Image (cartoon, coloured by chain):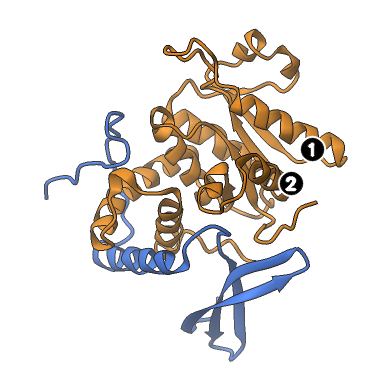
Amino acid sequence: MPEEKQSQSDESPGKTAEGTVRIQAACTVTSSGSVRVRLIQQSPTANPKLVEAARKFAQRLKEKEGDEEEHIDYIPEAPLILPVPQK
Amino acid sequence: MPDSGASTHRDVFVNCPFDSEYKQQFNALIFTIYDCGFYPRCALEAVDSGQLRFEKICQLILESPYGIHDLSRIELDPSTQLPRFNMALELGLFLGANLLFEIKKPCLVMDTERYRYQRFCSDLSGFDPSPHGGDILQLICVVRDWLRANLEPNEKIPGGEHIFERYKLFLRHLREFCEEEHLNPDSISYYDYISSLQGWLEGKGLREKQTS
């Protein structure tokens, strides 16, 4: 697997035969010099600004806490808001 | 056919109740659809569009290549002594559109029990609804397994139990995110919920498979 040196993304609208679709383009430059472009489809109903804010929020958490996924008890009476465990 | 302005090839029409009693299942259902690489579409989109709800539902059905229908809340309302017919109506529209346009859109029909439908809609005989018993984990597993069958063979998604763990983690992070964004997590709108969810999955690196 070639080493990936750089990754950047930008939002742009796209057109298909079926109609307008919001996409995100992510470009990756490999060690061999080739550029890999990935087009990521966006939800037709999501708010792009809030999506971006949530993406940055999750990235911050990922950098801070890593990828470990701890077991969390599910509380049926309060399903949306789960208590933050004591640290 | 209506203009399919924002449709995608992975849109899933979601036919279920939107009341507070179903909120637990609804949030889990939407999360699972996203986490499996699909996009939920439902009548809640009509709230801000100014479009007649029935027209919007018909448009969503025509635009969406897949459908998930949960009939589990078709039951007598204690105050009116009448059942809720919206889910049955929308399932009928979905199946009718398939016949009318001679297309075969895959659909998942769920209920609390496998054969309960025979007591309120026996014409559904042969559709074999998948039971989830009102249990969140079971619902996630049923939806995940059905979506898995509609993915490309080379695509990978985690099992239902793992998606359930991710879902609980998302709920915890959503609280913090809502504080940052000055949103009320108790009354977060559908738009804000799916926007937060999509961004969270992408930020966690779990949403890279939606290539086009």
Q: How many marks?
A: 2
Q: Nearer the viewer, residue B8 or B156?
A: B8
Task: Indicate the position of residue B156 as horizontal and vertical percent values.
Answer: 58, 52
Indicate the amino acid at tag 2: Leu
Residue A43 vs A40, above or below: the answer is above
Q: Which residue is farthest left?
A: A87
Residue A85 vs B75, above or below: the answer is below
Q: Which residue is farthest bottom?
A: A33
Q: What residue sits right under mark 1 in the picture? A: B97
Q: Secondary structure at mark 1?
A: helix
Chain corresponding to orange in the figure: B
Q: Quadrant of residue B114?
A: top right
Q: Chain of mark 2?
A: B
Chain corresponding to blue in the figure: A
Q: Residues within 10 Å of mark 1 (few under 14, many from 20)?
A: some
Q: Chain of mark 1?
A: B
Kindly identify the residue that appears in the image at 51 percent across and 80 percent down: A10
Indicate the amino acid at tag 1: Ala
Residue B12 vs A77, above or below: the answer is below
Q: What residue sits right under mark 2 in the picture? A: B62
Task: Indicate the position of residue B193 as horizontal and vertical percent values.
Answer: 41, 51
Left or right, B30 with reference to A18 = left
Which label was assigned to residue B151? none
